[in-house]
Amino acid sequence: MAELTDEEWAALKEALDAVRSRRRRPMKDERQTIEAVVWRLRNGAKWRAVPPELGPWHRAANLHARWSALGVWERVFEHLRDTAHADLGEVMLDGTSVRAHQKAAGATRTVHPRGGR
């Protein structure tokens, strides 16, 4: 099960190598883990739904969370954009999957004089 073509993987690998720390230790099953992250993001599924042939779901989830916190993904997308791989550097956030607390809309609570809301 391949989420990325060999050409896409080569471009992504080049970008990853360019933006990651040089002190890092080699990642076990790097392509498989990155493909698990890509699969999950393309499908919008829960991490536990990642197909077993893409490796342990928790490895992909931990990698995604760690790289998100460190800004690795942003640097990868910037590198891809700047090196003429704009098709791999495009990112979109689908707002239908973002949850917010009901008070996040900023509406104030109005009390009506007859006891209703």
Image (tube, helix red, strand yellow):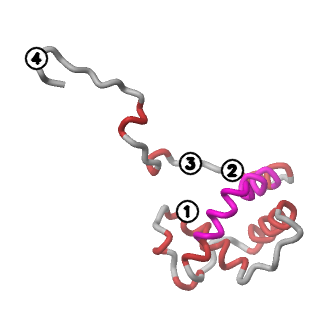
Mark linked to residue 110: none
Q: Tell me the amino acid under the disc marked 1.
A: Arg
Marks 2 & 1, CB-CB < 8 Å contact: no
Q: Residue 78 location, x and y as percent?
A: 79, 50
Q: Which residue is mark 1?
A: 42
Q: Residue 111 location, x and y as percent?
A: 22, 20
In what element is the residue under mark 1? helix
Q: Which residue is mark 4?
A: 114
Gap between marks 2 and 1 measured at Cα: 13 Å
In what element is the residue under mark 4? loop
Label 1 or label 3, whichever comes before in sequence order:
1
Q: Which residue is mark 3?
A: 93
Q: Which residue is mark 2?
A: 90
Magenta segment range? 61-79
**Does the magenta portion include 73?**
yes
Gap between marks 2 and 4 measured at Cα: 53 Å
Residue at left 56%, top 62%? 41
Gap between marks 3 and 2 measured at Cα: 10 Å
**Does the magenta portion include 93?**
no
Q: Residue 30 location, x and y as percent?
A: 73, 78
Q: Is residue 21 left or right of residue 37?
A: right
In the rendered image, the quadrant that contains the C terminus is: top left
Closer to the camera in the image, 77 or 25: 25
Q: Tell me the amino acid under the disc marked 3.
A: Leu
Q: Residues within 10 Å of mark 4 (few under 14, many from 20)?
A: few
